[in-house]
Amino acid sequence: MTGRAFPEDRPKEPGPVIEASRLRKIFGDLVAVDDISFAVKPGECFGILGPNGAGKTTTIRMIYGYSPMTGGMLQVFGLDIRRHPRTIKARIGVCQQENTLDPDLTAQQNLEVFARYFDISEAQAQRRANELLRFMALEHRKDAKSAELSGGMIRRLVLARALVNQPELLILDEPTTGLDPQARHQVWERLEDLRARGLSILLTTHYMDEASRLCDRLMIMDQGRILVEGAPAELIRQNVGLDIIEVASPDEALRQFIRERDLPSEDLGHRLIIYLEDRNDLYHEIRARYCGEGCTLRMATMEDVFLKLTGRELRE
């Protein structure tokens, strides 16, 4: 892509792009964000995971200045969000969950009009719109109104709009929710390209494979607090091990075997999950003695970590 649609040539900030210390947000009697501290390094993709109501969206809304913080310290680019909100907003791009495109405008017009909010000249806005439409593989639909676009195209256009001001930080709130697998992978490829260009990215998502693929580091929140933080591979190894044995319809003999060996596991009644800290012959022993065909060995994933730490109950 030609031009300067992205800040890859800009010098990186010496300190964290985002730094939060004892950050709090309270709505009446509800403590939505409860005394959390974290930092996002320049050029990394940092993910925030958690069940519904964990405080993810509330956290990022404080970061881009939409929701005022109740307490603590929050700096973006080394600037206090309470004292320099306009300066910070000019340097970030935000891709929200909702489709907030203007339905009466074409894809290109949505980008050009939005660029004007950043005091970008008409000629520059047109040039950046064209560059971003090419980057998002939307050039062939530049004259289509947003209502005429597919769900995947809409998400790519919303992402393009968030890049129109050449942000140094891109904030994405569940960017691929509701998309089919092909559309999700298209968005992922664009985000990987942006990360490779050095753009700092803050991401919330419910998709564990998305977090594992895109994020250099992430944190899992629940009930407004941080449970764990680290690189995806490290969190998997530290919390659930390398492999998982899943046993359907386990019997009491297998449960007794697990207790005798003191193996880390979760008993879900109809299913037993056994966490393996290292690869060994335990799977073959369990399969031969206890479960026959109802026994599966697979690699541990971020989803295993997420469910182990936040529970398996539905959150409304």
Image (spheres, grey):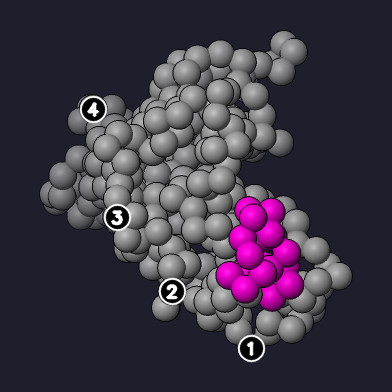
Instruction: For marks 3 and 4, give the one nearer the viewer.
Output: 3
State the residue at coordinates (75%, 56%).
100
Residue 299, label in figure: 3
Distance between the alpha carbons at the discs numbered 4 and 1:
60 Å
Q: For mark 4, what is the residue?
A: 262
Does the magenta-highlighted stretch encompass residue 149? Answer: no
Instruction: For marks 1 and 3, give the one nearer the viewer.
Output: 1
Residue 3, label in figure: 2
Distance between the alpha carbons at the discs numbered 2 and 1:
20 Å
Instruction: For marks 2 and 1, give the one nearer the viewer.
Output: 2
Distance between the alpha carbons at the discs numbered 2 and 3:
43 Å
Q: Quadrant of the N terminus?
A: bottom left
Q: Nearer the viewer, residue 99 or 116?
A: 116
Label 4: few (<14), some (14–19) or many (≥20) C-alpha neighbours in 10 Å: few
Could you say which quadrant of the image residue 14 lies in?
Answer: top left
Left/right of residue 179 with respect to residue 131 in the rendered view: right
Q: Nearer the viewer, residue 41 or 211?
A: 41
Distance between the alpha carbons at the discs numbered 3 and 4:
21 Å
Point out the tag, 3 or 4, that comes first from the N-terminus: 4
Point out the tag, 4 or 1, that comes first from the N-terminus: 1
Q: Which residues are magenta?
A: 108-125
Q: Do the CB atoms of the residues marked 4 and 1 lie less than 8 Å apart?
A: no
Q: Nearer the viewer, residue 44 or 265?
A: 44
